[in-house]
Amino acid sequence: MRQAILYLKRITITLFILITGLQQVDAQNGVTLMEWEQRTLNFMLDRNNNYGGTLYNRGLFRENVNLMSPEHEIDLLTYRYTMADAYDWQEADQAYRLASGSLNATEFYIENKIKFNYVFNDNHELLVDGTHEEKLRANRFLFQLGYEYRIKENHRVGANHTLTNSKSDLDLSLYYRYGDFETGMIQTGITYLDWGANVVQDLAAGSANQWNDRYKTTYQYKRRPLLFNLKLISPTIKNFRAELLTGIQSYSEKEVSSTEVENLDYWDEEWAHYVGALVQYSHPIGVVGFTYQRRFSKLRRQPLPGSDFDDDFYTRQFSNSGGFFVTGNYQKISVEQWMWLERVVDQLQGDAVPDDISPDYLEDVRRPFDFEEYRLKMKSRLLYGSSEKGAQVGLEFHADYRYLQGEEDPSNGIRDYNFRRAYPIVRERSDRITFTIGYRINPNVYLLAGVSYDVDGDRESGIGWPRQETTRFDGGFGRLSVEW
């Protein structure tokens, strides 16, 4: 941990000296957490297409999924657009973006995004936002269709509705906004989550029979969840700009029943919230700032009185992340440094926790755990090339260092061994060097491809045992960005 912090300090000082010494550079736009918030909201809005579906037993945000490789997080850090890229996305009215890269021997990570805003006149606007993402935590194709009405100068009201294949998973959002993203805004909203679920699930229960297992499990909300959110984005004042994005999914109660086996009813209670905050300072030589990001979810599952349902547990997951970033341009050279220090807690406790969490090659055993770790993530980027037209080449460094806080197992000395038997995907060190080449057809169309060299060599298994074999090729990826 001490070596990682020392390395982090050296990177920060080097970039600060480099950037503050530059002259005659292009002005920087900014950084935003809006894309991070939308990814968080997608877990709440599109529950059916999250890994494991609506009735998944391990929390809303899927912090740990055994389909993941130990390098899943560093893969996403490498392949995705940055929060500076997200700022450009927010400013665009019409845009498309693709990011795709290798997750394992047989699967790609892929994320397609498209947005289209059509202005009928000064008062009426149609909004279309689409997301296609496959990344093991989710497999979703989610569109939102919206309408916005300008009441008067700077005052707008709007509505959004999700479009997805699950009838039980439709959501209606209403909001009021003062201002806009570029000049500063306040937006408050409420979302009626799964508004048609009870009617749809009642129809499913009535359609169940021995020849159709599609409806073998149904549910009814006894207390329906609502999502309240708030966006505060300041105007730029003396080069400072700030964001506060927060949402609360209200307490919900759900009764779940089996239509093929009698007396297996259980009760679910759930809570969730998120908070994102950002402050930045912009200067012609670059942008510097800090971020805070939090996600929290809790699920309590227990059998109904008289039920033969086996499980009786709660799962609680949250992450708190503090970040630092600095970016700058000088003629055809651009540099970026991103760093996050994160605390992650994953708890599974109760009288009878699920016994089906471990991979298939391990025995089914109930393994309660109280897992805690600190993670240090870094992304360093150096690019050379025109931002208007022509080729760009780049060199990047990515790192994901995990510092487990649990006790060492007395039989083998492996820290958090009980958790890692349930989730053998925890590798304490992952770092890589990435080479990129891109081409900008014009300021609005950009293609990029990259390949990574594995610095750590995959010398540790996900359970913690050392590995003799090493690998150096660490996956390839590509991006395409178009605005019009």
Image (spheres, rainbow, N blue to C red):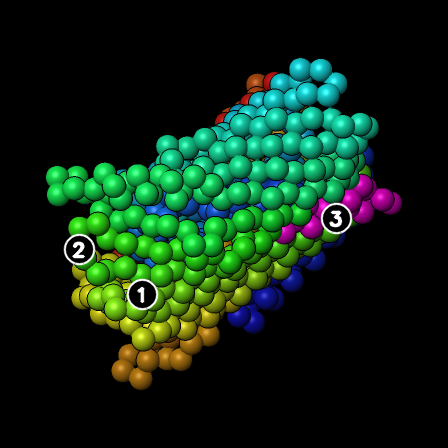
Q: Within 10 Å of the Cα at label 3, are there few (<14), some (14-19), or many (20+) other Cα atoms? A: many
> Alpha carbon of mark 1 to alpha carbon of mark 2: how far?
15 Å
Q: Nearer the viewer, residue 330 or 341?
A: 341
Q: Residue at x 67, y 18 (%)?
A: 119
Image quadrant assignment for residue 208: top left
Q: Which residue is mark 1?
A: 304
The percent coordinates of residue 46 (x first, y second) are 44, 41
Distance from Cα at disc 2 to Cα at disc 3: 54 Å
User: What residue is at 82 percent from the left and 28 percent from the top?
Assistant: 153
Residues marked 1 and 2 touching at CB (< 8 Å): no
Magenta-colored stretch includes residue 91: no
Q: Nearer the viewer, residue 171 or 374?
A: 171
Mark 1 burial class by Cα count in 10 Å: few <14, some 14-19, many 20+: some
The CA span between labels 3 and 1 is 47 Å
Magenta residues (range): 231-246
Nearest to N terminus: mark 3 or mark 1 = 3
In the displayed image of the protein, which residue is found farthest to the top? 120
Badge 2 or badge 3: first in the primary sequence: 3
